[in-house]
Each structure stands twice: as C-alpha cells, then as structure tokens.
Image (cartoon, rainbow, N blue to C red):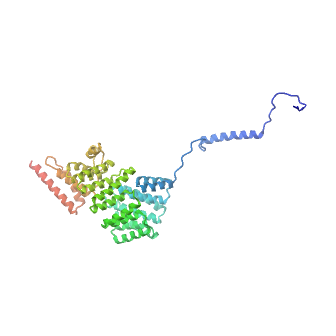
C-alpha cells in the first residue's frame, strides 16, 4: 500500500474538529423553541403533546335528525330533549324553534291533568315566541303559533286554574295568526289545516271544512292534515268519517299513541267498545316497545271496561296507571269512579279524597295498597272536567256511607256546597246536591232521635 508523505511528523491522536456555526445556531434555536413551548403549555395556550384526541363535537343538525327520528318513533320526550340540545348549539335557527313548539304542543295530549297540560303548552308558547322574534313574517312560524295558541286556549277553557289569560282572546289571536300565515303563503298546507282546527273551535263548521279540504289538496302526506280532518269530522259527530281520517294519519305516523287514543274514543262514541280497547292496547304496546310508562292508555282502557260493567278488569288497568304515576290525582278520581260504579263505596271514599282534597303519604290508603307505600297527592281543582266525575260523586259517596254512628255528612255537604256555588244553573248537579242533602237530613234526624 502506498503511503503519502506530507512532511509532517506523524502522531496517533484524533484530529480536532472545527466548530460549525450553522450547527450551533440550530442547537440554539431548538433550546429557545423548547423553552417557549414549555411556557405555552404551562399557560394553557398549547396543549401537551400525546394527549388523547377529544371526541368529535355534535352539530345542531345531528340533534335535529335525532329529534325527528324520535318523534316518528313515538318517543316524544326524547324528541323534545333532542331539539332542545340542537337549540343550545344553534339558538337562532327558526326551524328548530318551530318544530320544538309543534312537538311540545302535541306532547300535551299525553298528559292527564290540567296543570301538566297547561305547563307544557306554556313551554310550547315560549318556544314559538322565540321563532317569532327571529322572523315575525314567516308563514310557518305564524301557522305553528296559531296551533299553539289554539291548544292553549282549549286547555284553559276547561280549567279553573288561576291563570290570568282569557281563552277567547287567545283563540282570536290564533285566528289572526292563521289568517296572516295564509295571506303570506296560500299554499302552506299546515297553515290551512291549523286554521281549520281553530275555526272548528269557533264553531265555524263550513269554513273549517273548506280550509281542511284545501290543505289536503296541497299535501296528502301530512299526518297533521289528516289528524285535523279527523277532528273536523269528530267535532260534528261524524265518528266513522273521523276514524277514517285518523287511520290515514296513523298510516303516515304509526307510532304516535295519541292518534290511537283519538280513534279509540270515536269507537267508544259508536258503542264499539271492544274495537276501542284494541286501539288503546295498540298504544300500550307501542309504549312498551319504547320503554315509556304512559298512564293515559290504561286510563282509557279502564273507562271502556267500566262502561261495559267489567269493573274488576277496569280496576286492574287503573291501578297500572297509578303505578306509572302515583302522584296523579286524576287517576285516583278514575279509581273512585270505578269503585262507585261497582258499588264499592268504602274503597271509593279514600280514592276520591286523595283526588279532590289531596292526601299525605300517611293518609294515602290507595297507594299503600297498590304500591306498598304511600305518596303525597295534590288534589284536583274544581273544573268542568272534574265536577261531575269526582266532586259530585265524592259528595254522594260520603252521604251514602253516613250513619248516625259514623257521620260523613259534614264533609259531603261541604263538597256539594262548592259544586252548587260553582254551577248554580246546572239542573242535574243541583238535583244531585238536593238528593244528598235529603239523605244527610235523615242521618241528622236519626242522630237527634238517638
């Protein structure tokens, strides 16, 4: 091997490497960058490396789709929650407010007391007012507002809850909204249908039928239109035609239990009790599939069996409704009515007492027997819906049970006096009051003679 001669004395130490200024600059930059990154992480400006990837944020549209699917499935509570979640992300979305108000209004039909229904309709009213603020000249907004106000007015009409609003004024306001929605868009089928529903409540039959026919010509795929067409017929006593329209609504939306309730009630009006119960039982099965504990279908089944004199089965269904909602005073009233029809006045008395006067958990004999424990119940106010079924019956039961040794007449006369003051011109109620006053007079005379 040839060795190159350089003239320098050989040595065996490694040669010194000369420093590279570019490399030094790179190291300096990395050090400064690292210090900056640490400071940013500590201040929260930059997230640490290798942290778990955050889950994807849901959009308002995804909640809207979920709400639509839940409503179509009949899970109305879930639908309301989904739309509320969507609005928490996109509060300026008019369509979301409109649909939420519509669903909230429909959901009120699944509630069994005046207070619950009115509270839900007030929520619907609040929702639609948000849409009105965003666009007061939108035909859909005005149509749904008319729908909400109409149902709210109807709920107030049958209630004596202390709410300082005039149902007639609300109904007139609903009509104005529906008329304006029609002016803005004459082809808005929902607007026409809701207009027809309002006109029925104002007993303007011919005009209502004109509008609902026009709505159906525009949209033959809307369950709302068929539902209202059914209502137009039902309100005029055309029960078979009403059933036909409600059934078409069911074909479009087969999981909405309130449609089956409407069909059942029309069959009851036709004295077809077995068929009515079939439709109520369909509502029960839908709720069971969805895991919904809704007492309303059981109450309807109990009423149908009571009308046939099958009191034992009626009581079983009413008690099932009570298990689902043990604080619902209306269910206690239903039980009291069934017991009264079965001439079981001893069990009717505590049921009516909880329904009308309310009762504490310790006083609640019905819940103790059915549930194994008592619950507090707030009594129902005296209204046109409760007076005949509960108040008059309770007074009659107390009078019937009164004896010289065990006299319930003071409470009976107090209840009946409330009825007499509230309904002085109702001849049927006044005759019931008079009859029970006579019974209590005889009880009082017997005690005096003893």
Relative to the observer, which residue lies in front, 64 or 165?
64
Asked which quadrant contains residue 48, the reply is top right
Left or right: 356 as drawn, with respect to 247: left
The answer to whether residue 356 is seen in the rendering is: no
Left or right: 29 as drawn, with respect to 136: right
The percent position of residue 261, horizontal first and vertical second, equals 33, 58
Residue 199 versus residue 35 in the image, above or below: below
Residue 361 versus residue 429 in the image, above or below: above
Left or right: 165 as drawn, with respect to 418: right
Screen quadrant of the N terminus: top right
- The residue positioned 40% from the left and 63% from the top of the image is 224
The answer to whether residue 142 is seen in the rendering is: yes
- The residue positioned 28% from the left and 63% from the top of the image is 270
The percent position of residue 35, horizontal first and vertical second, equals 66, 39
Asked which quadrant contains residue 268, the reply is bottom left
Relative to the observer, which residue lies in front, 330 or 220?
220
């Amino acid at each position: 091997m040839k060795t190159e001669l350089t003239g320098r004395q050989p040595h065996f130490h490694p040669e010194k490497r000369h420093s590279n200024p570019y490399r030094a600059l790179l190291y300096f930059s990395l050090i400064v960058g690292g210090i900056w990154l640490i400071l940013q992480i500590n201040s929260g400006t930059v997230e640490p490396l290798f942290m778990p990837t955050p889950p994807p944020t849901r959009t308002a549209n995804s909640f809207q789709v979920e709400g639509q699917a839940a409503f179509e499935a009949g899970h109305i509570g879930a639908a309301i929650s989904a739309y509320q979640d969507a609005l928490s992300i996109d509060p300026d979305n008019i369509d979301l407010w409109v649909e939420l108000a519509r669903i909230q209004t429909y959901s009120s039909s699944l509630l069994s007391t005046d207070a619950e229904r009115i509270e839900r309709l007030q929520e619907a009213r609040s929702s639609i007012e948000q849409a009105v603020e965003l666009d007061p000249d939108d035909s859909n907004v005005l149509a749904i507002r008319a729908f909400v106000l109409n149902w709210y007015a109807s709920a107030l009409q049958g209630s004596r809850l202390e709410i300082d609003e005039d149902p007639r004024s609300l109904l007139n306001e609903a009509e104005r909204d529906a008329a304006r929605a029609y002016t803005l868009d004459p082809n808005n089928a929902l607007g026409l249908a809701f207009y027809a529903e309002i006109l029925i409540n104002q007993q303007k039959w011919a005009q209502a039928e004109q509008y609902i026919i026009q709505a159906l010509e525009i949209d033959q795929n809307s369950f709302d239109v068929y539902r209202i067409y059914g209502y137009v017929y039902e309100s005029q006593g055309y029960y078979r035609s009403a059933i036909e329209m409600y059934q078409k609504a069911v074909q479009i939306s087969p999981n909405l239990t309130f449609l089956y309730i409407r069909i059942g009630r029309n069959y009851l009006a036709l004295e077809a009790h077995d068929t009515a119960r079939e439709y109520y039982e369909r509502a029960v099965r839908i709720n069971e599939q969805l895991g919904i504990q809704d007492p309303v279908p059981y109450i309807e089944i109990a009423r149908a069996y009571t009308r046939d004199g099958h009191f034992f089965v009626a009581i079983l269904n009413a008690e099932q409704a009570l298990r689902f909602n043990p604080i619902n005073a209306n269910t206690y009233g239903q039980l009291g009515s069934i017991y009264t029809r079965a001439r079981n006045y001893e069990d009717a008395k505590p049921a009516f007492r909880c329904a009308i006067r309310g009762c504490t958990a310790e006083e609640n004999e019905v819940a103790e027997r059915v549930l194994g424990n008592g619950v507090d119940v707030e009594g129902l106010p005296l209204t046109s819906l409760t007076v005949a079924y509960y108040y008059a019956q309770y007074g009659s039961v107390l009078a019937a049970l009164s004896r010289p040794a065990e006299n319930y007449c003071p409470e009976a006369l107090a209840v009946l006096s409330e009825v007499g003051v509230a309904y002085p011109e109702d001849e049927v109620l006044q005759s019931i009051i008079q009859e029970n006053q006579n019974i209590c007079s005889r009880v009082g005379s017997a005690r005096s003679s003893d």
